[in-house]
Image (tube, rainbow, N blue to C red):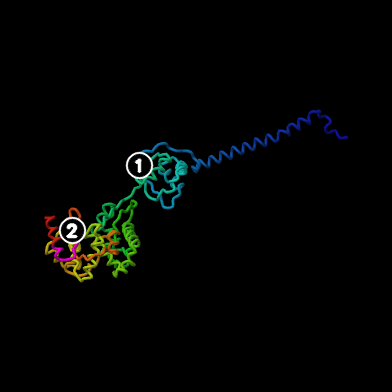
Amino acid sequence: MSQLGLGMDYDDEPRARRRRSSGPLAVLVAVVMLGAVAFAGYLGIKSLTGAGSADDYTGGGTGSVTIVVEKGDSLTAIGRTLATAGVVASSDAFVAAAAANPDAESIAPGSYALKEGMSGESAVALLLDPASRVVEKVVIPEGLRVSEIIPVITKATGLSEDEIKDSLARAGKLGLPAYAEGEVEGYLFPATYEFQPGATADQVVKAMLSRFNQAADAVDLEAAAKKRGITAKEAVIMASLVQGESAPEDYDKVARVIYNRLDDDMRLQFDSTVNYALGTSEIQLSKDQLATDSPYNTYKYKGLPPGPIGAPGEQALEAVLAPAKGTWLYFVATDPKNGVTEFATSYDDFLALKRKFQANVG
């Protein structure tokens, strides 16, 4: 018989069984420890990426920081831009604030003036405030000539005259309509433009030509001009005359005078065209000035001048395409100070209006 186990106490085996019963507890401890390690690793990764961070500044911040929101930027991308610039404490702070504001999805591309150390909520609010946008505003009044528009652009943007003129020379590639026949006068549309800092001359000129094309489409310029028996270019020329000769309330009447005089084979005899030829803007012109030998002198030559004399607005274009009904052949700004223009059909009535003008201006 084997001697194995003969010397074992009776309670030795139960003690062995008790040691084996502690196994599940050891497994549980191991699982908890592994979970703790995994959670610590998760937190470590999050701390490195910034994802899920609750860090946020309070208040509206201080100083000034200019940031750029690029076209196509997501809210997360904007948040990273702001965090990198020190505007917000973390990308998550901004994203969380944006998620709480439904308008945040409408944040537009562009440059913005923000502050350092802003709360996410304050940053969202400023990005939605139009006053925070950093833009170069260019205001082009109706009727300006190219020679007058260029200084307005240079003053507002810091671009040089040479840069603008170089772009104007390439206008055909920047949106100038074919019927303009390469001449940009009359096609830099009068409007208010906003450009990002650093905009190029090509971008500025292209925007103005694009705005003209938009207005031309709105009034169906080419088709409507054809119905009137004129070309699109002639319509723009006529609109520039209307713009230069009268106030908006009289545009359609002045347009009718142009049609009537052309139909009667009369010279237009518009002071505005002579002023354009001379580079002046005078109310009364001398006999010598009226005798200026220029194709733009409508006292000397019949028909329309060879091109526009300024930049007409949409209302002037509309007036040419839908003139008032009437038999007028003459009009006189009888009270220039108060913007009063009167119309006449006969030459005698015209002379009476002219005397009225002279009495008012002295």
Across and down, in percent, residue 347 comes to: 15, 66
Name which residue type carries label 2: Ala
Residue that badge 1 annotates: 64
Name which residue type carries label 1: Ser
Say above or below: 187 vs 139: below
Q: Residue at x 48, y 38 (%)?
A: 54
Across and down, in percent, residue 227 comes to: 32, 69
Q: Residue at x 24, y 65 (%)?
A: 326
Say above or below: 62 vs 160: above
From the viewer's perspective, tell me whether residue 204 is left or right of residue 330.
right
Q: Quadrant of residue 20?
A: top right
Dot 1 alpha-carbon crowd within 10 angstroms: few under 14, some 14 to 19, many 20 or more: few
Tag nearer the camera, 1 or 2: 2
Residue that badge 2 annotates: 333
Say above or below: 170 vs 99: below
Dot 2 alpha-carbon crowd within 10 angstroms: few under 14, some 14 to 19, many 20 or more: many
Across and down, in percent, residue 123 comes to: 41, 42
SS at mark 2 in the image: strand
Q: Quadrant of residue 191?
A: bottom left
Q: Which residues are magenta?
A: 343-351
